[in-house]
Amino acid sequence: PDSILFFRMGDFYEMFGRDAEVASKILEITLTTRGSGQGNVPLAGIPYHAAEPYLVKLLKAGHRVAICEQVEDPKTSKGIVKREVVQVVTPGTVSQSVLLNEKENNYLVGISGDQETLGLASVDITTGEFRVTQLNSDRRFACLAQELSSLKPPECIISSSLAEDREIKKALTGLRSSVRIMEDWNFESSFAYNKLLEHFNVRSLKGFGCDDKPQAIAAAGAVLAYLEDTQKTHLTQITRLHSYDLSRFMALDKATQSNLELTHNAQDNSRRNTLIEALDSTRTAMGARLLSQWLLHPLREKGSLESRHQAVAELHDDLLMRGKIQDRLNKVFDLERLLGRLGRVASASARDLAAFRESFKIVPEIVGILEKTQSFNLKIIKDKLFEHLDLVAEISLLISKAIVDNPPLGVREGKIIRSGYSDTLDELKAFSADGKNWVARLENQERERTGIKSLKVKFNRVFGYFLEVTTTNLSLVPDNYIRKQTMANCERYITPELKEKESLILGAEEKINNLEYELFQQVRERVISQTAVFQEVAHCLALIDVYASLAQTAKENNYCQPVIVDNGVLKITNGRHPVIEKTVKNEEFVPNNTFLDNDENRLLIITGPNMAGKSTWLRQVALIVLMAQIGSFVPAEAVEMSIVDRVFTRVGASDNLAMGESTFMVEMNETANILNNATADSLIILDEIGRGTSTFDGISIAWAIAEYIYNKNKIGAKTLFATHFFEMTELATIYSGIKNYNVAVREWRDEIIFLRKIIEGSADRSYGIQVGRLAGLPREVITRAKEILKNLEEKNYTKEGKASFAGPPPVVESNFQLSLFSPLISHPVVDEIREIDPNNLTPLEAINLIHDW
Ligand code: ADP
Ligand code: MG
């Protein structure tokens, strides 16, 4: 009821009434009216063959579109042609490829919940991935928010009673997700349970590992019900439900994901200069999507991580093997989405089958290349693929025999099936060819018989075959020609024999097209009957693709294999920032060491001027840990690290203006989230927290936060804390596990040079004024700032933390007139004047000095 209805009428989709009014504005198409008597109906239409761009626009504008097709053949039906809504296109259920990014999943998410538990189900109907999890702990809302920001679903469905929950609303904010509220019964557990049993055709859900998770089931069932409602077809690509536990993964909350620019950058939300872009050398869309899933779900289990590292290492060292594999993967199409498309009668084409055939050719080759692999994970892939080789070969052969090399996009106009596949088809084709030959011969025959040199045999859709004679030759037309049509300078005729052949030819062609369609459908059915197996094959290929990609990136960028230890240490030797090391243009990236543990080096305070490289270092430490925990090699010379359960990254308010809300409030919200969720195994990155408020407030809050995190009875997490409050460096003198670091700079005359080296100890000055000068502030402003700084350094702050009186600006008469007697002025000449004793100068000495100055 709340969708815009595309109502198929001939070659158009028409929209009526309110739909037409709304859509015509969004689509910029003409609004007309139709009807008589009881008032006019607004009407707007779009051509059906060019509907996709319009559909996209409507979806982007937040609408859903119900597509109503003619479901009878207009030629054979009586009266008004029967129509049905065949699909409702919504943001989370689009399958049109123009609307999809091939490197990203497109999830529909369902959320259910009661007093203690939340259920979350996600489905990507284009690939068939269907997952579910249940969240039980006190942290369930934080987990939900975090998982939602990893999945980035374009659409969420949620029960009406849950929709009112404050925590849920909070978790959904800022997601850019279209939220659909559904009545509670959709989430009722027995309804949901039965939906799932029915779809998977099973007796219980034990096999999916979620039999005892009622909220997970409720969410999954509601998602399925919604899919049935909108897709109007059985989704063959959804072959299994995968139940997972979020505690297996490193937690990355939304702020951390965006601060670290993992999959989207902060400037334009694209992939440019993100970690995924730096890591992604995959050859298939399936691999690219899997890599992005890994990136947002780093592992926490040592064994699985080491197996991943081992697989990457093998492909890293064995260039030849990796080269061969990637060469084969280049030829693989997006099998997951192909299976999705093939599952739907209306969208499947013979090209999809041909793409399958091409992709499958390389499967035995991959198995061969992996023959001697030593890595546990690659062996598993090889064995899985080996297990399915027979079926893969059988289907490849079937498609090869049945489908021509380059089939057309349409499936109703023939030219799909290879000759030799079906005797009946070949007979029909021979028959039609005979007829066509007869017609072809007819032209010459009739020219000779009648003596009309210009006589032609032609064909058009309205009259079928006919003989055409120019007006000058009309006298030569024989008796058996029957006149059909008179044109400007010719006449068109038919003969009974010609019409007889014509009906044979056309009849045969229609039969051919129908038969080809039928045979195509049979092959398609055969392929999708094995969807589950082929999904497994596709997943294996995606996995190898990801390993090979990580290996390639590691090799090209000189990464090292991280060593996982259990002693709480994080030791990075000459670490680099994987993205910035590629983007620094005029200078070489300077690598830095990092040492953190659970005792003496628990919390590091980093000070140093703006632009020195503090934020870069902080982020690179977080990124290295995260990369290691997805199984990747890391940008460093050597890394020894203990597994981290959560990474938190917070950036001080004024560094992050894009948010819109009161920035200090956002900063404090996010910090509260850390203090409530971090553990001793977490890694916390705080970048200039507390700068969104007055100095004294800021220092006090920053100080208290640092103490709380440092306290082993509260959190005790490994922490890097960059700050511009020098007062914070005193923490190191009070607590044994807090250390000061700063970024080395060299002063040269009145300028600073950034050395980009992180060294122990606190910075002595912030060089803010020098940085201001580098940035091109006018000289007057710099001079005045120095005066004020000096005054402040002497008088400090008022009780409220406000800058105390800085003295009036000197009266400036001309541009750079210095006042000789102001004690504030600092200038080499002024300083020298202060030093000398005029009473002991000879007149000549005085004159010489003045000359120098
Ligand atoms: P801060 O946080 O101290 O103000 P940033 O970390 O934002 O400084 O760094 C400022 C710029 O300095 C970066 O954008 C980058 O271009 C450059 N930079 C930072 N660290 C390094 C490094 N280790 N080697 C080379 N250039 C660096
Ligand atoms: Mg910074």
Image (cartoon, rainbow, N blue to C red):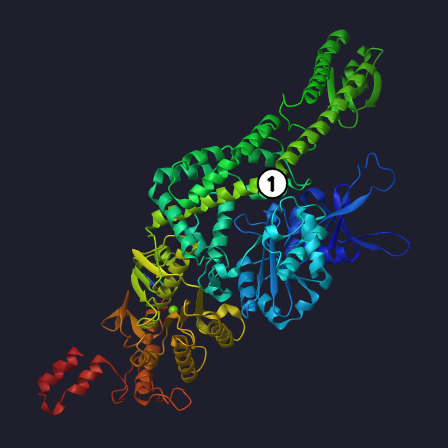
Residue toward you, 285 or 321: 321
Furthest residue in direction right, as rendered: 37
In the rendered view, would you say 852 is above or below 755?
below
On the question of residue 413 being in view, the answer is no
662 above or below 212? below
Label 1 sits on what residue type?
Thr
Secondary structure at badge 1 equals helix
Q: Looking at this view, is 459 or 167 the one in front?
A: 167
Q: Residue at x 30, y 71 (%)?
A: 742
x, y percent for residue 844: 9, 84
Report the front residue among 595 and 256: 595
Is 403 rendered above or below residue 701? above
Whether label 1 lies within 8 Å of ligand 1 gets the answer no
Q: Residue at x 75, y 56 (%)?
A: 19
**Where is residue 410, by image quadrant?**
top right
Side (left or right) of 95 relative to 290: right
Horizontal arrangement in the rendering, residue 719 relative to residue 254 (left or right)? left
- What residue is rendered at 25% in x and 73% in y? 750
Q: Sort mark 1 into few (<14), some (14-19) or many (20+) by Cα contacts within 10 Å.
A: many
Q: Which residue lies under the disc numbered 1?
A: 531
- Camera-side residue of 264 and 144: 144
Image quadrant of residue 480?
top right
Q: Position of residue 61 (x, y in %)?
A: 65, 58
Q: How many marks?
A: 1
Ligand 2 is found in the corner quadrant, namely bottom left
Is residue 541 shown above or below 229? above
Residue 345 vs residue 688: left or right? Answer: right
Q: Position of residue 9 (x, y in %)?
A: 78, 44
User: Percent from the top left, x then y, of residue 704?
Assistant: 41, 81
- The answer to whether one can see residue 623 in this image is yes
Quadrant (top left, top right, bottom left, bottom right) of the C terminus:
bottom left
Q: Quadrant of the N terminus?
A: bottom right
